[in-house]
């Protein structure tokens, strides 16, 4: 048990903290390196809106903004203050919907993205792994070959393009799915059966995008893992002992090939999250991606900062959770 | 009466990639018989074809390996089975583990790393006989491994928690679960240290003495053969060069290669320097003509370069393939 | 001429490579055509607006009065160049980090890999959006390439490191060490030649990533939208509501070209990857 803590858990906790530390530090440094002064940009934007403001008020506003952005004091003081606010869970008010706190806006958007992403990631992982293992174990099947070709064809295409093609085909040319959103304008989200149905219909294409792109990677990965594992001693041995094929495929081949895929799932979450953001923009799905787009259009600097920080912490935490689950599947880690 | 007879078996690996094809003549015209109640040793250096031979006999022929000609016939006294043409499912149902079991080379890694030992027993028994009562099944397995001198708590362990010797004993316990007529043991002691080796060999020997079945023991280690085998066959470059009872092989070897193998064994009190063979094992993708040993043979003659030596019976149970023997020079 | 021989072998025996060859040739021809384009891509309203594909305008014309086909020849060229800039910079970083981590080992390896893994798991898009947002209006497509290069190395650095680790165990490395060769020269002379084929394969993969990222950032309006690229083509089409207005070809052209480019590069990558990986080659033989 001590060995497990020392050799498995401790390095992972360290890595988790490192990811957050590096990520947050990068988001702290970027605005300070950029040639744009966010305060000046904000001031000039308010001025250009045409309202006449007296110079004193402008100066006052400038100070308030500097304070809010955490730009007062030396860089080190700023950095410490930055962490201080973060640990208190304070990301400041949104500028475009002043004074709504950034955290509340993110809190409203996050469940949509999370629900969609979680479903899509789990589905594509399971489907990709099962089919990938079958593809390798039964290399002669025509159907599996067709799936192989399809997954190879979709895999390299960026999320945006896949989403766009699906949107054009299934909402525009053959209108079986709604064009955009998570529910029609005017309905209020609730847990009634009819709303759930509407929600599912609206989420089908966005989810399909994530599944289609994600699936190929798991499929190809599992295929190559499986083809390595079927020549492992314990599989050849199991075949020689006359254990039934089904049992060998599930308990010997897939069970072992799955392990690197679990690690891979953790490593891919960042990329999938990025994909989900852009997919939401295409389908105007009211999650983190749409919030990002609004923030960009409305020049809401603090909201973008908040989204970046939340994303980093969120993804790092999910990866860490995956690390915590992993020993359940691998006794070699569990009993060192 | 032979329990397993192999006749003129040829099994090659044929591969092709980017237009280049290659054929490795791993087993090239091998014939021998296994009898009930004996330990038959197969010796030879690595890549001489003994592992391939095992693969064909145990029904593990997968591309690029293919048996091109010859026959392997298994006879348990009730029925004869052609091992090269039997369907995989029939093989699985009737032969595997019930009739022929296998202690595999590198048994360190033959156990599924994510499954407890008891589960492997369960998988095998379930697939062949079905399990009605888990409790009864567990008692049976416990009785079986206790008989072999293994502690019961091994069953609840994962493979990586066991030592190499213990894992090999578990592999033997698995192989003897159904009291098969033939046990194939492929390098069963290679990765173990000497003390553990002796224990494992002792276990194998005792099991054989008790159940009177046949053990096909494959190892490059001549010392193991000297201690355990009843008869020994020597392979070189995909062919049999000599076969005889163990005593005869060690006392009066005839083939130059056999002589080399035996003279390289350490012996107490003997202080001669060991000579090593010149050259390296032949490339089986392009084997030497004639006698395959001729490029490395200290006694090679002209005829060895051109003609394949025939197998000659020198005594009733001693046969050898060498031009020198045929010519009466030895 | 081993390279020519490899290409010939791959064309003969690998259908994926053949397909990649056709796709990438198409892309290459388009890039070359940009040199003889009758239209300046920076000028708007030079042809009639919103005309569907015809013989005169194979991909139709846009709502900005531009010929989409000729405009796309520049877009493909720029997207491809962007991929090259990113790949070049991130290759340099990946090789340096990979070789140092793999060769030096110890705490340096631990620190480098901790940083490396952090970038692997981090969601890069939000960070790039933040960057793009702050640099809006000041971003040109070259700086975008550099920025993507700075973020695009971690996967490949890890790969190179693992290669070096396995090379280190080989006999020739030990011989070099025992004969007193400086570690740096062992790295350059002995290891780099083995690492280079992998570097080449990952280059293609990295270009895929970078061109895709450009599409994403452009669609959000965060790149230099005045330079024609695949991403800015989609950006302008979206700005003019092309899909709603029925100007479908404006969306279809960049989408089609993106698919050809991405598939071509990906097929090339997987074909070459298999060619240089002895294990997959063995598997090919086995199947």
Image (cartoon, helix red, strand yellow):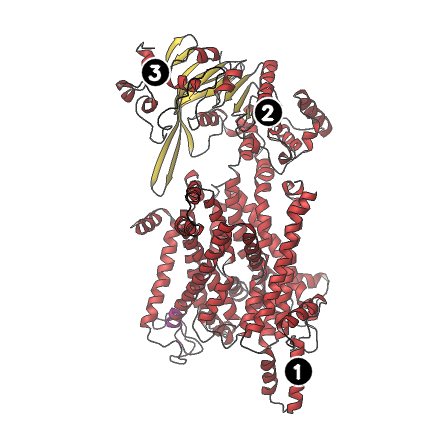
Q: Secondary structure at mark 1?
A: helix
Residues at circles 3 and 1 in contact by the CB criterion of under 8 Å: no
Chain name for mark 1: A
Indicate yes or no whether the magenta region holds residue A194: no
Discs 3, 1: same chain: no
Question: In this figure, which residue is indicated by the disc labeled 3?
Answer: B322
| Nearer to us: label 3 or label 1 | 1
As drawn, is A237 to the left or to the right of C228?
right
* Alpha carbon distance from label 2 to label 3: 38 Å
Question: In this figure, which residue is indicated by the disc labeled 2?
Answer: B196
Discs 2, 1: same chain: no
* Whole-percent x, y for residue B315 in the image: 41, 7
**Vertical order, B103 against A38 (above or below):** above
Image point (34%, 24%), residue name = B296
* Alpha carbon distance from label 3 to label 1: 101 Å
Write the start and end of the magenta stretch as one range: C45-73
Residue situated furthest left in the rendering: B302
Residue sitting nearer the eye, C135 or C112:
C112
Quadrant of the image containing the C terminus of chain A: top right
Quadrant of the image containing the N terminus of chain A: top right
The numbered disc on residue C100 is: none
As drawn, is A319 to the left or to the right of C175?
right
Label 2, residues with CA under 10 Å away: few <14, some 14-19, many ≥20 = some
Image point (66%, 82%), residue name = A63
**Vertical order, B237 against A83 (above or below):** above
* Whole-percent x, y for residue A205 in the image: 58, 61
Image point (42%, 60%), residue name = C260
Indicate yes or no whether the magenta region holds residue C49: yes
Q: Main secondary structure of the magenta part?
A: loop
Residue situated furthest top in the rendering: B316
Question: In this figure, which residue is indicated by the disc labeled 1?
Answer: A63
Q: Earlier in the sequence, mark 2 or mark 3?
A: 2
């Amino acid at each position: 048990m001590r060995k497990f803590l020392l050799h498995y858990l401790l390095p992972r906790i360290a890595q988790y903290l490192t990811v957050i530390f590096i990520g947050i530090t990068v988001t702290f440094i970027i605005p300070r390196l950029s040639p744009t002064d966010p305060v000046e940009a904000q001031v000039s934007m308010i001025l250009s809106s045409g309202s006449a403001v007296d110079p004193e008020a402008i100066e006052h506003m400038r100070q308030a903004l500097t304070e809010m952005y955490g730009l007062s004091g030396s860089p080190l003081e700023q950095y410490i203050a930055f962490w201080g606010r973060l640990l208190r869970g304070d990301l400041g008010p949104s500028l475009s919907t002043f004074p709504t706190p950034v955290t509340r806006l993110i809190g409203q958007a996050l469940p949509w993205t999370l629900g969609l992403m979680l479903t899509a990631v789990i589905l594509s992982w399971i489907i990709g792994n099962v089919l990938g293992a079958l593809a390798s174990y039964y290399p002669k099947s025509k159907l599996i070959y067709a799936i192989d070709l399809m997954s190879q064809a979709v895999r390299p295409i960026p999320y945006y393009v896949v989403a766009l093609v699906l949107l054009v085909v299934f909402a525009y040319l053959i209108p079986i799915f709604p064009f955009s959103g998570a529910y029609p304008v005017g309905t209020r989200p609730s847990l009634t059966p009819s709303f759930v149905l509407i929600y599912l219909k609206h989420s089908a294409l966005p989810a399909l995008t994530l599944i289609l792109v994600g699936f190929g990677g798991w499929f190809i990965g599992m295929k190559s893992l499986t083809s390595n594992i079927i020549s492992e001693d314990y599989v050849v041995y199991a075949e020689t002992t006359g254990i039934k094929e089904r049992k060998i495929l599930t308990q010997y081949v897939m069970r072992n090939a799955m392990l690197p895929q679990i690690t891979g799932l953790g490593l891919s979450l960042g990329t999938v999250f990025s994909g989900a953001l852009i997919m939401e923009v295409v389908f105007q799905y009211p999650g983190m991606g749409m919030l990002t787009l609004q923030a960009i259009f409305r020049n809401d600097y603090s909201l973008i900062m908040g989204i970046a920080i939340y994303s980093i912490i969120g993804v790092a935490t999910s990866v860490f959770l995956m690390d915590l689950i992993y020993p359940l599947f691998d006794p070699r880690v569990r009993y060192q | 009466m032979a329990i397993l007879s192999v006749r003129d078996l040829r099994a090659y690996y044929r591969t092709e990639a980017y237009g280049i094809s290659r054929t490795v003549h791993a087993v090239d015209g091998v014939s021998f018989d296994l009898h009930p109640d004996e330990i038959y040793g197969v010796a030879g250096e690595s890549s001489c074809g003994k592992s391939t031979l095992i693969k064909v006999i145990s029904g593990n022929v997968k591309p690029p390996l293919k048996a091109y000609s010859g026959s392997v016939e298994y006879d348990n006294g009730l029925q004869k089975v052609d091992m090269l043409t039997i369907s995989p499912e029939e093989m699985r149902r009737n032969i595997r583990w019930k009739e022929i079991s296998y202690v595999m080379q590198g048994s360190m890694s033959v156990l599924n790393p994510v499954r407890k030992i008891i589960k492997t027993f369960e998988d095998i028994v379930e697939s062949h006989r079905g399990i009605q009562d888990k409790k009864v099944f567990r008692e049976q397995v416990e009785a079986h491994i206790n008989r072999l001198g293994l502690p019961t708590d091994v069953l609840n362990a994962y493979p990586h928690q066991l030592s190499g010797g213990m894992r090999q004993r578990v592999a033997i316990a698995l192989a003897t679960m159904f009291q098969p007529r033939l046990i194939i043991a492929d390098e069963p002691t290679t990765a173990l240290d000497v003390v553990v080796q002796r224990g494992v060999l002792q276990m194998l020997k005792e099991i054989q003495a008790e159940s009177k079945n046949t053990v096909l023991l494959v190892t490059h280690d001549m010392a193991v053969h000297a201690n355990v085998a009843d008869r020994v066959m020597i392979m070189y470059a995909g062919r049999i060069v000599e076969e005889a009872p163990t005593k005869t092989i060690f006392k009066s070897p005839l083939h130059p290669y056999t002589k080399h193998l035996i003279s390289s064994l350490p012996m107490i009190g003997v202080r001669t320097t060991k000579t090593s063979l010149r050259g390296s094992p032949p490339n089986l993708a392009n084997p030497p003509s004639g006698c395959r040993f001729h490029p490395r043979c200290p006694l090679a003659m002209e005829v060895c370069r051109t003609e394949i030596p025939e197998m000659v019976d020198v005594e009733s149970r001693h046969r050898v393939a060498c031009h020198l023997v045929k010519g009466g020079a030895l | 001429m081993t390279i020519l021989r490899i290409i010939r072998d791959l064309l003969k025996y690998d259908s994926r490579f053949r397909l990649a060859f056709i796709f990438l040739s198409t892309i290459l021809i388009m890039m070359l055509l940009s040199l003889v384009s009758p239209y300046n891509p920076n000028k708007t309203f030079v042809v009639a607006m919103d005309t569907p594909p015809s013989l005169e305008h194979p991909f139709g014309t846009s709502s900005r009065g531009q010929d989409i086909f000729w405009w796309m020849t520049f877009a493909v060229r720029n997207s491809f160049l962007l991929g090259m800039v990113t790949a070049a910079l991130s290759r340099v970083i990946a090789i340096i980090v990979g070789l140092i981590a793999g060769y030096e080992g110890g705490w340096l390896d631990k620190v480098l890999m901790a940083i490396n893994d952090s970038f692997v798991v981090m969601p890069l898009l939000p960070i790039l959006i933040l960057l793009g947002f702050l640099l809006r209006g000041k971003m040109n497509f070259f700086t975008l390439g550099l920025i993507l290069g700075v973020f695009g190395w971690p996967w490949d650095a890890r790969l190179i490191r693992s290669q070096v680790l396995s090379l280190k165990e080989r006999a020739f490395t030990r011989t070099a060490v025992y004969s007193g060769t400086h570690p740096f020269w062992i790295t350059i002379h002995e290891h780099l030649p083995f690492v280079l084929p992998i570097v080449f394969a990952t280059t293609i993969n990295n270009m895929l990533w970078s061109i895709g990222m450009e599409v994403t950032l452009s669609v959000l309006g965060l790149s230099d939208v005045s330079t024609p690229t695949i991403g800015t083509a989609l950006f302008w089409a979206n700005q003019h509501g092309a899909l709603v207005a029925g100007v479908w070809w404006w969306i279809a052209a960049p989408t089609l070209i993106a698919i050809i480019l991405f598939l071509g590069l990906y097929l090339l990558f997987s074909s070459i990857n298999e060619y240089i990986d002895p294990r997959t080659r063995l598997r090919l033989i086995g199947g």
